[in-house]
Every structure is written in C-alpha cells, then in structure tokens.
Amino acid sequence: MTSTQAPGAPPPPTLWPDVLAAYAMPALTAGLAGAVTGQPQLLAAALTTIGGTSALVAATLGAILRRRPAHTRPARTTRLLAAAGLGSAGAVLGLAAGLAAAHWLPQLPALSDSPWPRRLPVDLPVSAAIAATITTWRRLTTAPRPVRNTP
C-alpha cells in the first residue's frame, strides 16, 4: 500500500479516540441525566441508541474524511460551514432512520409494548448531528490544507 502523504509529514490522526469519545461522552451525560431524574428509559437509551449512534456516525464520517484527499474540499469552504452542513445532513439522515424505525419496530411482537422505538426520532437525529458536527470540525482541523503555488 502506498502512502499519499508527503515525506516527513506527521501521520494522520487515528480514528479510534474520536469514536470512543463519541460513544462515551453522550452515553455518560445522558446516562447521568437518566439516573438523576429517575428515567430508566433514558439510562438505557444512553448506552444503546444515543451512544451507539454517535459512535457509528463518528466512525463512518471520520473514515470518509480521513481517506478523502485534502484538495477535494473547495478552498473557500470554511470549517464552520462544512461542520454545520455535515451536522445538518447527519440530523436529517438520523431523523429519517428514527422515523422509519419508530414506524416499523413496534410491528415486531417483541417490541410492540416497548417505549424504546418512540425515542428513536429524537435520539438518532440529535446524536447524529452532534457527532457529525464534532467529527467534521476535528477532522478538518487536523487535515492538511492544500498548498497553493503562486506564480
């Protein structure tokens, strides 16, 4: 496998710390909120849909941004605009997945009485938006900017 990095350039940042943080931070905060307020459903969601969605989005988006050459991003796109755009896209995709799951999962006999599917239209888009925004911000901060040759 050939490297696309310039000789002497620092190695690209590893992805696993971002994925671990993307799971742990929302799981801890939502889990703590569920424990303090006495909401066992929130505590369970913190460890499953909230933390899991965040980790999945961070892993997927982080891998895409890591493999993407630096010169493919338009030079005028600011980090803020890219993070906001991908965060919004994450929210829309999370909402679509949450609404579909909330519609179809209660039809399964094992989940027909469960309150869990009703949480998905809230948990998935919020988790996906936060994870996509933070991952994009961090990955574009560490990504090398294209060098422009001026005549």
Image: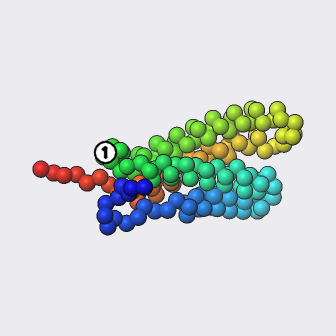
**Left or right: 61 in relation to 30:** left
Q: Residue furthest front?
A: 1
Q: What residue is rendered at 68% in x and 38% in y?
A: 98
Q: Position of residue 74 (x, y in %)?
A: 33, 43
Q: Is residue 20 above or below residue 74?
A: below
Q: Is residue 125 above or below residue 13?
A: above
Q: What residue is rendered at 42% in x and 61% in y?
A: 12
Helix, strand, or loop for circle 1? loop
Q: Is residue 65 above or below residue 117?
A: below
Asked whether residue 29 appears in the rendered view, the answer is no
- The amino acid marked with disc number 1 is Arg
Mark 1 neighbour class, 10 Å CA radius: few under 14, some 14 to 19, many 20 or more? few
Which one is in front, 122 or 64? 64
What is the quadrant of residue 34 in the picture? bottom right
Q: Position of residue 133 (x, y in %)?
A: 51, 50
Q: How many marks?
A: 1
Asked whether residue 83 appears in the rendered view, the answer is yes
**Left or right: 91 in relation to 102:** left
Q: What residue is rendered at 68% in x and 35% in y?
A: 99
What is the quadrant of residue 5 in the picture? bottom left
Report the residue marked by disc 1.
76
Q: Quadrant of the N terminus?
A: bottom left
